[in-house]
Amino acid sequence: MMKAMKSIATASLVLFVAAQFVRPAKTNPVSDEYRAIQSHVQMTPEVSAILSRACYDCHSNATEWPWYSRVAPMSWLVVSHVDDGRRHLNFSEWAGYDRSKALKKMHEIDEEVSIKAMPLSSYTLLHPEARLSDPERALVSEWAKAESKRLELAGGTARK
């Protein structure tokens, strides 16, 4: 029994070390300020700070890659989450959203923050600074609702 346990431990260690050579691409695409959300919507410094602190690691091109993003298998999970987050919403690429899509994104921001689906609990577990208080959630929700109304009234892609 002891020999089998040693073999399993050795095989696990070899697999763990081998996994370190399979590295997913951690990217931070070059961003143009004009394409970022701040150039297209009205935003208070408070909302900007909340989004930056709680959302940008997964929903912008300015991801700050933590140390564990360099260790497999966590690296695979982190890169997958960031890629998925950017696909769903990318604050750095806001200019790529037409009016209809921008409205949809604002509604989704309001909903996800209001029902406490975002930020993900798996993220806030390792990043407690990203946790949102109820007043912060209300502030982001009200901002998203106000921007939705402004977009609807503008009848086109809103600009500052």
Image (tube, rainbow, N blue to C red):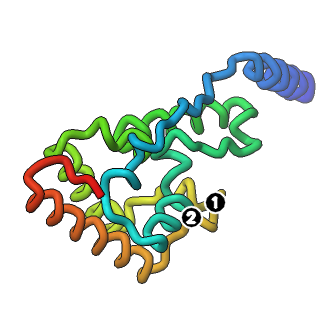
| Image quadrant where one finds the C terminus | bottom left
Residue ID at (24%, 64%) = 147
* Front one among 124 and 29: 29
Position of residue 135 relative to residue 61, above or below, is: below
Q: What element carries label 2?
A: helix
Name the outermost residue toward the bottom. Answer: 135
Q: Mark 1 points at which residue?
A: 127
Q: Residue at x 36, y 70 (%)?
A: 140
Residue type at numbered disc 2: Ala
Q: Nearer the viewer, residue 111 or 30?
A: 30
- Does residue 98 appear left or right of residue 12 in this picture? left
Disc 1 marks which amino acid?
His
C-beta proximity under 8 Å, tags 1 and 2: yes
In screen coordinates, is 47 left or right of 148?
right
Q: In which quarter of the image is the N terminus?
A: top right
Measured along the vertical axis of the image, is residue 88 above or below residue 49? above
Q: Which residue is drawn at 44% across and 77% down?
A: 136
According to the picture, the residue beneath numbered tag 2 turns out to be 130
Label 1 to label 2: alpha-carbon separation: 6 Å
Q: Is mark 1 on a helix, strand or loop?
A: loop
Up-down relation of residue 28 to residue 111 (above or below): above
On the image, the x and y values in percent for residue 134 come to: 42, 80
